[in-house]
Image (tube, rainbow, N blue to C red):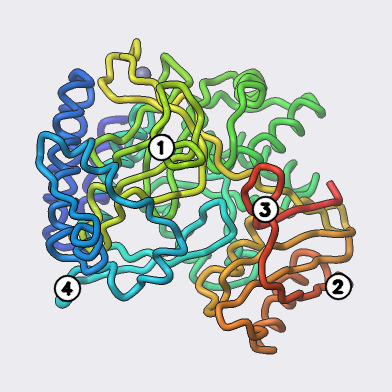
Amino acid sequence: MFFFRKIVYNLGLALYFIIYYRFKYFKFIKEYFFIKKNQNKSIEHNLSLQKERLYNIINFAIKNVPYYKGIVEQKSISISKNSIFEDLKKFPILTKEIIRNNWNDLFPDLKNKRTFITTSGGTTGEPIKIINDEDFIVKSSAAIKSFFEISDFYSGDRLLRVWGDERLILNESIGRFNYFKNKFLKNTFFQNTFRMSDSIIRKYIKEINLIKPKIIYAYIQSIEEIAKFIKKNNLNIVPIKSIITTSGILTNGIRIFLEDVFNCKVFNFYGSREISITGISCKNSNKLHINMYQKYIEIVDNDFQNVNEHEKGEIIITNLINYCMPMIRYRIGDMGSLDYSQCLCGRGLIRFDNVYGRYIDLFKNHKGELIYGDFFTHLFYFRENVKQFQVVQEKSNEINISIVTYNNNKLDESVEKDLTEKIHVVMGKGCEVNFYYVSSIDPCNSGKLRYTISKVL
Ligand SMILES: [Zn+2]
């Protein structure tokens, strides 16, 4: 039965790729087997594969992308395959500000290319747009499939996503269709955690016992809230094979708590909207195996100098597979440290000791429901003219939004109205929503700007 189901879902997956990306399906398969074949070889072997890909994308960028052409000319940088890890350090860090200011010079010729726009989730409160192409999407999908298998998730396994989607709350039809499609074609179920109350959590726990998912893939804070409820009310929960957490910071305390409540292994996943899958932990260790085939990771200090093994610093990512928008030394805004030793599981992949993404606040409305901070963040995706923003819950019925715009003008009244109405859906109509236009937003103590802050919880 298991193998039959596996075959059916893998065929479904193939069909999906062929319909959406035509013959790119073969690239997906090739990349998947490339990763599967090499991940158990030595770290040196994988470094040599990574070196090749790093050289190829940088060589492509300096020949085809105006921004990088300018950099090598200006700084007289020359590169060679053997010295590429050192050559890379001569390139400036790619910040969100540089991306915004050089937007027209960041691409090769994209004529006849099918491209997709995504937006960064990041930590710094500065949404930016990123362009992907089909090659990037199919290769990332191959990496997701192969790296999720580290956590025992295989295509066709029953998966429950404990996740946030503002579209369902705002009654936008596209959200519903997606979840319907995922349920029937991918055996993937969904629980929306952008709004959670005791009764919603109770309902979700009942659903988990009914659905009997093999794997739960969840926002850290959302699954933690559910686990707290189970523990507090002494509820029973069906056996789960593993939990994959993402978005936020998985501390040892939270991991141990989740493993205790669900009686299963918790795997830590690190990825982002703009860069895609970057790492996942394995059964033998809580450290995250890096997707070395598609990302090159550096950890740097405040002066952007590379730090030593195990030393915590900012994560800098060079994306090795996005040729339609090469991103060399991208400052994603998260922190971490590296471990170069061989893992007991036998995978020859460098690891993160841990990753420290952004901490997402939970808001609380007048009914006592918890609103996941990213609900507000998502309302700002693709808003023109928004450079930075910060949503602060001052009191249970007061939301203050600070906004920095590019042109120093206010947002259109219609945009403010739209934001207010959407916030009212979760916070209630009586909630006051204020907009403040400022020239800058001060970072918090950590030096990072936070999108969302709740002073109520
Ligand atoms: Zn391992």
Foreground pick, 441 / 354: 441
Q: Mark 1: which amino acid? A: Gln
- For residue 398, which quarter of the picture? bottom right
Which mark is first along the chain, 2 or 1? 1
Q: CA distance from mark 4 to mark 3?
A: 37 Å
Q: Tag 4, which secondary structure?
A: loop
Does residue 44 appear in the picture of this structure?
A: yes
Instruction: Estimate the spatial distance between the alpha carbons at disc 2 and disc 4, rounded to whole Å.
Output: 47 Å
To which residue does mark 1 refer?
305
Q: Could you tell me if the residues under marks 2 and 4 are in contact, i.e. CB atoms within 8 Å?
A: no
Amino acid at dot 4 = Asp
Alpha-carbon neighbours of circle 1 within 10 Å: few (<14), some, or many (≥20)? few
Mark 4 neighbour class, 10 Å CA radius: few under 14, some 14 to 19, many 20 or more: few
Q: Quadrant of residue 36?
A: top left
Q: Quickly name the residue at label 2.
A: 432
Q: Residue at x 14, y 49 (%)?
A: 78
Residue 151 visible somewhere in the drawing: no
How far apart in space, not on screen, are marks 1 and 2 (Cα)? 45 Å
